[in-house]
Structures are given as structure tokens and as C-alpha cells.
Amino acid sequence: MLIVGELINTSRKAVNEAVDNKNARYIQQVALEQVEAGANYVDVNCGNKVFDEVETMKWMVNTIQEAVHVPLCIDSPNPQALAAGLELVKFGTPMINSITDEAARFEAVIPLVQKYKAKIVALCMDDRGMPDTAADRLRVVASLHAKFMAAGVNDDDIYFDPLIKPVSSVGTAGVEVLETIRQVKEQYPGVHFMCGLSNVSYGLPNRKYLNRLFVAQTMTVGMDGYILNPTDRGMMGLIYAAKTLLGQDEYCMGYIKAHRKGFYPE
Amino acid sequence: MSEFEKLAEAVFAGDDDQAQEITRKLIDGGASPMEIVNKGLLAGMDIVAPKFKAGEMFIPEVMMSAKALSEGMKLVKPLLSAADAAGMATFVMGTVKGDLHDIGKNLVVMILESSGFNVVDLGVDVAPEQFVAAIKEHKPLIVGMCALLTTTMMAMKDTIDCITAAGLRDSVRILIGGAPLYPEFAEKIGADGYCVDAVACKEMAASFIPAKIRN
């Protein structure tokens, strides 16, 4: 299971202000909190700084690495910003978030994957648009997987993101994702998955219940990576518990530890 | 409760069978088509919108109400006079070039249509030139643009620049919306407003309608 901490994103108001004021301490504190809460990677996203994304990315990467020595997930649809961030990553194997099978974007990002031997989050979309069904997604996965193999990218470095849509707008959005994971797992057993969670519950009340339940449902069919808020103890406690029930927790020690740390208040 | 109120109630409840039945009854009883639209169908949506905004109703319920409204509208529309139909403000809507996201855009289209706008939906990945062509063809009061990606935000600026270069900027109001956007961005690129969600878009669009058309 790979947890990417999502909190350092300038679309969040507090982070945006800290970045504007070059408040390094705040950014470093958010990085540290996420790592202490169990994040394996720290995501860095300043995509909404469209007028100076590259410079902002450099400052954020350097600032974060002064505080934590974990690998970073460089997050942008803009290849220049990705390159600027990757150039500065000092610890472990960097992750790139993300590539798609849109021709121009694939061509721009794949050289970075090769140059930095990076892990790559691959969104299941192409020039035809956003996917609806599992079949749409499987078509993109097949195409991307073949291109990754040709580019010398290992299965173990590939993280497919099935792209989760709101069930409030498309009632079958959840089951199509579950079916995608099941089939990808069957056809490409060596690859990994990554996804965000909050989309699924958009437009509905009590979103945290839906988000947590969807983690359990996706883990059951083989999802093994999430980009989320690791300081959400309810969510993290549920992930530890799900791992135990799915036989991914030797002697149930992860679960017992979480219990002792007070993850299950009731 | 009058038949109009019952119709509004059916739209509010998202009951499309009821909405159809009452609309048909009103038509058969000789009610004016424009009154059926305004006092019945749109009045129902006017109950929904503020409740959605306040977090008391949710997207699936809004979709059901919009469906009920459109079932009634199908029956009334052929009966509207040319003058009535011309009174509806036109709204050209699209997701900008390079961006393939459609869920948010579709929601906006649905809300606008159920608020009495004549919506021209250009779809996704719409090039600046396509927006310009649509403005020339449909002469809209308002143009709406949507972007979900930080990389496609600038396509909004390109589109506005293209509309300006075509000499059409002063003929339309331009609204933008989408997850990565913020009000200052709208100002910076020369749009007339930023809409945080579909209802905000509807409200802002309605505020642009000149009073003589509004009623």
C-alpha cells in the first residue's frame, strides 16, 4: 500500500497563502505532519499558479526537502513544471503525477519518466476523452501499458489511476471503477494503482462515509495506492483495518498498533 | 393548491410522470403556454435552486427535478409562440480547448435550461474559433466557459482574446467556472464573472438579462 499525502496543493487556501508569502515553515510543517501520519510520498502541486508555476514548484520542492527526507510526488499536467521539480528531488525514487494517453501529453512526459527512472501515475484517459465504462478504461490501459513497455518502464513503477467520477452524476461510476481494477489486476498483475477519493462523493451529503467505504471496496478488488489526507485518522484507521481483513497485515500488527495509537475511539 | 402550484410541486419532487400529466391537463384546459412554463415548470425549479445552494438538496435530486421539468417542457415548447421563444436569452456553453471534462459543464447546461435559457452546448475541447463562430451564429447574451485543468485555464484567456480580436467582446457577457479557477483569475483574463457552481452561474446569468426580456 502506498499513501501519497495530498495536502501541499496551492488549490488549498492555507497552502496558497503560505506559498504567496514564502512562508517556508508552514509548508514544512504540513510536510512533516503528513510523513508522521504515514505518508510514503508527499505530493507537491502548484498547478493553479499558472503565471509562475515553474518557479513556485522549485521553491516548494526545496522547501519541503529541508524538512522531510521522503520521496516526492511531483504533481502537474505541465511538463515544464514536472521537469523543474524532478530536477531538484533528492530523496528516493520520485513519482510523476501524471501522464495520460493524450498524444501530446504522453510525448512530453515520457522522457521525464525515463530520465529520472520515476514512478508514474497514469490517468486512464486519452484524446477521446474521459472514460465512462470499464471497457473505456481497459482500452487506455492496454495502449499505455504497451507504450510504457516500449519505453522501458517497469510494471512496478506504473500506477494506473482509473479516474473516479461522482456517483451523484453517473450512478455507475463506482462499479465501473471496481470492474476496471479487477480486470487490470487480472491482465497486468505487476502494475499498481493510484487514485484520489473525494470525487466519488461529490454532490452528496456525508461525504466522508462514502469516501471511506469506497476505500474499503476498492482495496478489496486490488487497489494499492491512494492520494489522500493522511492526517485524517478516521480514514487511515479504516485503511489499517481493511489491510488486516484482506490478509495484508502480518500478525495484525498494523491494526493493533493503530489501536494503541487511539485510532478507534469508540 | 392551483394546478400551477401542483406542477411546480411535481418538478420540485422530481416526479416526471406527474409533471407530464399536470402539464397536459393545463394545456387541455386552455392555460397559456408561457404561464405553464413560468408559473409551473420554472417555478418548481425556483424552489430547488436555493435548497441546492443551501446544501439541503443534492445533485441527484436536482437532476430528477430537471428531468421532470424537461418532460413538461417537451409538451409545452411546440405551443410557445415565436415571440415567446425569442424572449429566452441564449447562452453559449463549452469546455475550452484541450480540456475533455464534461460533468460540471453538463450540470451547468441542465440548470440553465431548467431556468429558461436557450442553451447552445458546444461540448468539450472547444477551440476559440468555435466559440467565435457560435457567437456569430447564435448571437448569445452570455458565453460560458469551463476548464477543469490548470493547463487549460489559459485557453480561457486565448478564447477571450480571440473573441475580442473578432470584434465581438462587447456583444456578450463572459462567465467562467471550474475547479482550479478563482475570482481574481476571471478579472485577470477579462471575463465578466467567475461562478463557483451551477446555481451561481444561473444567478449571474439571470442578472445579465435586461428587464424588458426578463418579464
Image (cartoon, coloured by chain):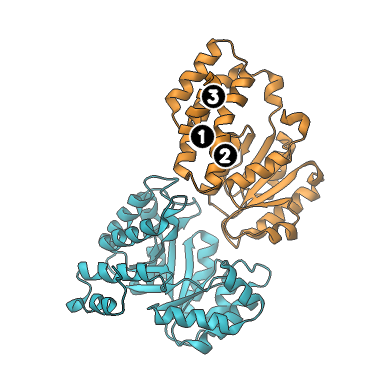
| Residue B160 at x, y percent in the picture | 73, 52
Chain (cyan): A
Whichever of labels 2 and 1 marks the residue nearer the N terminus, that label is: 1
Whichever of labels 2 and 3 marks the residue nearer the N terminus, that label is: 3
What residue does disc 1 label? B66
**Number of residues whose C-alpha sits closer than 10 Å to that of mark 3, classed few (under 14), some (14–19) or many (20 or more):** some
Give amino acid for label 3. Glu
Give amino acid for label 1. Ala
Residue furthest toward the left? A251
Report which quarter residue A58 is drawn in.
bottom right
What residue does disc 3 label? B5
The residue under the point 57% across, 39% down is B111
In this picture, residue A51 sits left or right of residue A192: right
Query: Whole-Å distance between the Cαs marked 2 and 1?
Result: 7 Å
Q: Which secondary structure, mark 2? A: helix
The residue under the point 45% across, 45% down is A169
Picture mark count: 3
Q: Is residue B205 above or below residue A192?
A: above
* The N terminus of chain A: image quadrant: bottom left
